[in-house]
Image (spheres, rainbow, N blue to C red):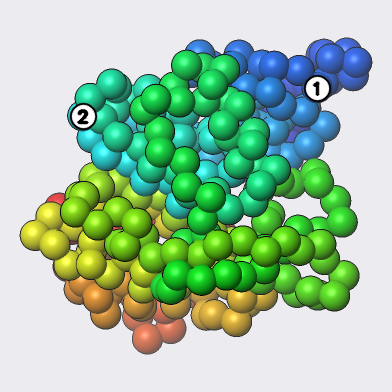
Amino acid sequence: MSERGGYRLAKAVRRLRSRDHWQSVFRTPDGFQIKLDLGAYPDCTMAYGLYELDTARLIKKRLKPGDHFVDGGANIGYFTLLAAKLVGPTGRVDAFEPHPTNRARLLENLDRNALRQRVNVHPLALTDTAGQAEIYTGDSDDNHGSASLYAENAAAAQSQKIQTARMDQVLQDTQPDLVKLDVEGAEPLAIEGMAALLTTANPPALIVEYNPTQSRVAGFGPSAFLERLLAIQPAYRAYFIGRSLKRLEPTEAGLAPLRQGNLLLKTD
């Protein structure tokens, strides 16, 4: 099911619930207790287990007990919770979430599900350097996943100062098995900032958002993160994540014809 299809289904199902109970703690199909608002996206899809469903299925296939998962742009913890359950008490999860409100909800959700001890939460934005930056949100809080280092109209957006970091410095002397990057346009910088992890003998598999619209706002071409990844580690192969994996062949035109979605990048 596509992301749009899942959203349409979630909106249809929420009509069966009184609006007085749209803001509540929901038990998701994966068994997690998450405080959500059915009137907001992506909350309504999360409540019914329809948020990025194909990506969730892929994570379930790839992660096993004892693995190390990195959630770059963890938001309120939907995939962080799933990974923490999958890797078990012998595994490790590192979640990076720079936006204070989202991070507070992430921590609350970890505590609610008794998974805080399995997750290292980092109040950092992943880029190619350690320092400070502004993170922007729009006037509406309807989509809490839209917080970004880039704004189409910065003067009209709300902003906060946050800390930035390189992943390979924060996670030095570790070797992740799977890394998810959904950092709203900063993916090329995040790739540069994990170069040391990408050039090991066993580079991690990556799940990266392909979002041409946000890439344009950030000033990057839609395939810039893939170009930088292949320049660092040419062994990676790219697949579009759907009901099945579709192998992609980068060309001089990049991946421009591709619709928005998530890519799996792996060397195995």
Q: Label 2 belongs to which residue?
A: 66
Instruction: Give the SS element for disc 2.
Output: loop
Identify which amino acid the numbered label 2 is placed on: Gly
Is residue 200 at least partly visible in the picture? yes
Label 1 packing within 10 angstroms: few (<14), some (14-19), many (20+)? some
Report crowding for label 2: few under 14, some 14 to 19, many 20 or more residues within 10 A (C-alpha): some
Left or right for 4, reference 194: right
Q: How far apart, in angstroms, are the residues tagged by discs 1 and 2?
A: 35 Å
Quarter placement of the N terminus:
top right
| Relative vertical location of residue 228 with respect to residue 169 in this rendering, above or below | below
Say which quarter of the image contains residue 139. bottom right
The label shown at residue 23 is: 1
Residue furthest to the bottom: 252
Q: Residue furthest left?
A: 201
Along the line of sight, the residue nearer the viewer: 15 or 120: 120
Residue 112 at x, y percent in the picture: 57, 17
* 192 in relation to 198, above or below: below
Relative horizontal placement of residue 101, taking residue 51 as reference (left or right)? right
Q: Position of residue 64 (x, y in %)?
A: 24, 28
| Visible residue check, residue 264 | no
Residue at left offset 48%, top offset 36%: 79
In terms of secondary structure, where does tag 1 sit? Answer: strand
